[in-house]
Structures are given as structure tokens and as C-alpha cells.
Amino acid sequence: MSWRPIENVERDLEKAEEQSALYGGVFVKGANSVEIRTGVIIAARYADKLRRAVFAAFRNAVKQEEVLRAVAELNRSIYDRLIKMGVGKLDIIRITVEARVDGGKLTFGEPTIEWFISSEKAAELQSQLADCRKTLAELRQRLEEILKTI
């Protein structure tokens, strides 16, 4: 299966029309500034969802090539952040980013990534946090004892 940019762009434009009709994932913040939200999605699908949301927001304001270029740069930076955060492909996330058009160029602000975890994972993390706090309290006590002897 090969990646055909023209077919993908056409599909994304169709999906963008559908998305703008069904979901309000774009909020106008100013004359040339909007806030784009992906909604709650699995991490593996963020790039498609983000590209479609940007196409929906800027379908008449910016050339397709510019949208593709800008979104590709944004996707790279988001991917790096997701990897650093340790987000898995099937984890649930929501991405919010501010986009601005200046002189035909599309630029994005710093994206906000919300990572939703299950209650089981939250309980596991709370248990780990409690263990760390206990260890830290023990280390503080030992340090105070050492300082007193010195």
C-alpha cells in the first residue's frame, strides 16, 4: 500500500467538510487566529484528525500546500512530545493548538496535549507515588540523623 498525497488530500478535504458540519473543533479567537481541538482520540490517529481539523478551519484562507507543510511540522513536534511523555499508540489524548495566518503563512502556537488514563493506571500511579513519598520521608529522617551526628 503506497501513500498517495493527492488521494489523501482529497479524502481529508471531504472529511474536513464532514467534520466542520458535525463537530465544532475550531474556535475563532481573532481575525487571523483560531484554536483547533482534535477532540478525544487515540494517539495513533492524532495526525489525521489534526490535518482534517486544520483543513476545515482554513479551507479558503490558505493554500493546500501551505496547510500540508505547516501541519507536517506540527505533527513532528507533537510526535516528539508524545514519545517523551511515554504516550502509547492506543492511549487516549486531546490536542489543542492555536493557529494563525500571517501573509499566507500558517503558524501554530505551542500545542497542549491532554493524556487521559484509566482508573486502574491512576490507582497504580497513586500507589507508586505513595511508595516514593514513604522512601523520601525515610531518607529525610536518615539525613537529619546524619546531620545531627556531624
Image: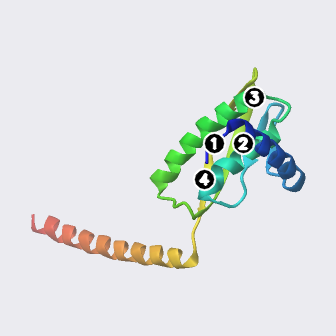
Q: CA distance from mark 4 to mark 3?
A: 22 Å
Tell me whether the residue at label 2 lies in contact with that at label 1, contact meaning CB atoms closer than 8 angstroms: yes
Mark 4 — residue? 113
Mark sitting earlier along the chain (3/2) = 2
**What is the secondary structure assignment of the residue under circle 4?**
strand
Q: Amino acid at mark 2?
A: Asn
Q: Which element carries disc 1, helix, strand or loop?
A: loop
Cα gap from disc 3 to disc 2, whole angstroms: 23 Å
Say whether disc 2 or disc 1 marks the residue closer to the N-terminus: 1
Q: Which residue is mark 2?
A: 8
Residue 76 badge: none
2 and 4 marks in contact (CB < 8 Å): no
Q: Secondary structure at mark 3?
A: strand
Q: Would you name the residue on which mark 3 appears?
A: 101
> Within 10 angstroms of label 1, few (less than 14), some, or many (20 or more) residues?
few
Residue 145 falls left or right of residue 96: left
